[in-house]
Image (tube, rainbow, N blue to C red):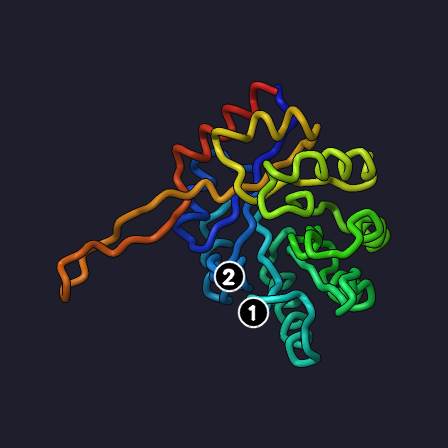
Amino acid sequence: MSNKQLEICVGSWQSALAAQLGGADRIELCDNLSVGGTTPSFGMLAQCKKLLTIPFFPIIRPRGGDFTFSKDEFEIMKEDVICCREIGCQGIAIGILKKDGSIDSDRCSELIALAGAMQITFHRAFDRCTDLKRGLEDIIELGCCRVLTSGGKEYAYDGIEGLKSLVSQAGSRITIMPGSGINESNLLEIAQKTSAHEFHSTAKKLMQYGVDPINDEPYRSLETSIDTVSRLKEILSLL
């Protein structure tokens, strides 16, 4: 039996439920996926807590854009971590950088302390580090469980060599989780060439919901597909 795990990034409760039904091992829960994900609402957290039996990790990110945050934004992030802890989330995804492109260990440490027993994923802010090797060591020192990364490239497939190097550097100290652009056509190759054990995908497809009465056109949105998640899990079962 494969020990490979699949995390699905979702932007709605419908997608979260689809990911679970498709066999995902874990969910990264976001709002505003068009800007890379922001912290979901309390209502979203509460609904997912009711619907899901698999772990879901909300992203702690107050806005899109860069990963250096103002004092007020950081205060919001701290309150969001407390909210996730109190509602019973099993983990969160965080990522804060300094203006020089290094890991902001002081602020990350504050969030981790507030998280209590929740697992910590360091998200793709990592790929904006000026020194990935140094950044990885800083994240390991923080005590994070995993790093979501595309190997310093826009997409994981293009970052295979970087991912392979990070997996080697990490050893058993932290999990390197490739993500960004992972799909049915490239998952097997990425897994084989990087030797990673966890993978991150949106597994999304274009869905239609109702009809706009003004122009008689269907409403469309990108949502996670149960079938796509299932096929990704089947690919991982081959390894």
What distance separates the C-alpha of mark 1 from that of mark 2?
8 Å
Res. 7 image quadrant: top right
Relative vertical location of residue 166 with respect to residue 210 in this rendering, above or below: above
Q: Which residue is mark 1?
A: 63
Tell me which amino acid carries mark 1: Arg
Of residue 216 and residue 233, the one placed in the foreground of this image is 216
Q: Residue at x 66, y 40 (%)?
A: 177
Q: Residue at x 65, y 26 (%)?
A: 3
Q: Which residue is mark 2?
A: 35
Q: Is residue 126 left or right of residue 190?
A: right
Relative vertical location of residue 225 with respect to residue 112 in this rendering, above or below: above
Q: Residue at x 51, y 61 (%)?
A: 35
Of residue 41 and residue 135, the one placed in the foreground of this image is 135
Q: Pick whichever of labels 1 and 2 is earlier in the sequence.
A: 2
Percent from the top left, x then y, of residue 102?
79, 61
Quadrant into which the C terminus falls: top right
Does the rendering let one see residue 172?
no
Does the rendering let one see residue 57?
yes
Instruction: Look at the numbered disc 2 and give the secondary structure of its residue.
Output: helix
**Contact flag, marks 1 and 2 (Cβ < 8 Å):** yes
Q: Quick one: which residue is furthest to the bottom in this view?
A: 72
Quadrant into which the N terminus falls: top right
Assess disc 2: are there few (<14), some (14-19) or many (≥20) residues with their C-alpha within 10 Å of its C-alpha.
few
Tell me which amino acid carries mark 2: Val
Percent from the top left, x then y, of residue 55?
58, 46
Assess disc 1: are there few (<14), some (14-19) or many (≥20) residues with their C-alpha within 10 Å of its C-alpha.
some
Percent from the top left, x then y, of residue 234?
50, 24
Q: Residue at x 67, y 26 (%)?
A: 193
Residue 2's disc is none
Instruction: Look at the numbered disc 1 and give the secondary structure of its residue.
Output: loop
Q: Is residue 63 left or right of residue 100?
A: left
